[in-house]
Amino acid sequence: QLESGRNEEVERAAAQMLAAVTTVQAIETARGGDIYQARAILERAEQQARQAPQDERLRAQVEEMRVLRDALPSMAPAAEAGGAEYGYEDATAEAAEPMPMPAPAAIRRAHDTAMSVIQSD
């Protein structure tokens, strides 16, 4: 009987809102210097979003969270940006790998998308 009361559209909208709010939270956490925690926030949000009823917008949010997760180290103070605290053997080699989208642009885009969802464009 509970299944008949479910509304996929409402569940999808809730998943989109949760993904947006956690994206902003992860960016805020990274700006505060805790890149490890910001990545953990995004990983949990990605997992939750993948379990929700899917549509194109939610799939795009999940992909954007993945890109953002990879871009977060660019927000760390210069001493931490290399990634040594994440257990990389050669932090300079890891930092030198090209990213598909410049990190500041990826962060800005993820933030803009999240705020658009939160403000219910």
Image: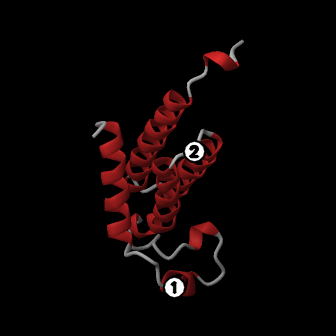
Residue situated in front as seen by the camera: 111 or 87? 111
Res 54 label: 2
Q: Do the residues labelled 2 and 1 touch (CB within 8 Å)?
A: no
Q: Position of residue 67 (x, y in %)?
A: 48, 65
Q: Position of residue 103 (x, y in %)?
A: 38, 71
Q: Which residue lies furthest to the front in this view?
A: 4
Q: In this view, does 55 lie above or below 91?
A: above
Secondary element type, mark 2: loop
Q: Is residue 18 above or below residue 81?
A: above
Compared across the picture, whether 13 is left or right of 28 comes to right
Secondary element type, mark 1: loop
Say which amino acid is labelled 1.
Glu
Look at 52% across and 53% down and name the residue there. 59
**Residue 2 image-quadrant placement:** top right
Q: How far apart are marks 2 and 1 (CA)?
A: 32 Å
Residue corresponding to mark 1: 97
For mark 2, does the 10 Å Cα neighbourhood hold few (<14), some (14 to 19), or many (20 or more) residues? some
Quadrant in which the C terminus appears: top left
For mark 1, does the 10 Å Cα neighbourhood hold few (<14), some (14 to 19), or many (20 or more) residues? few
Q: Where is residue 86 in the image (x, y as percent from the top left)?
A: 61, 67
Q: Where is residue 70 in the image (x, y as percent from the top left)?
A: 51, 67
Residue situated in front as seen by the camera: 89 or 39? 39
Residue situated in front as seen by the camera: 3 or 107? 3
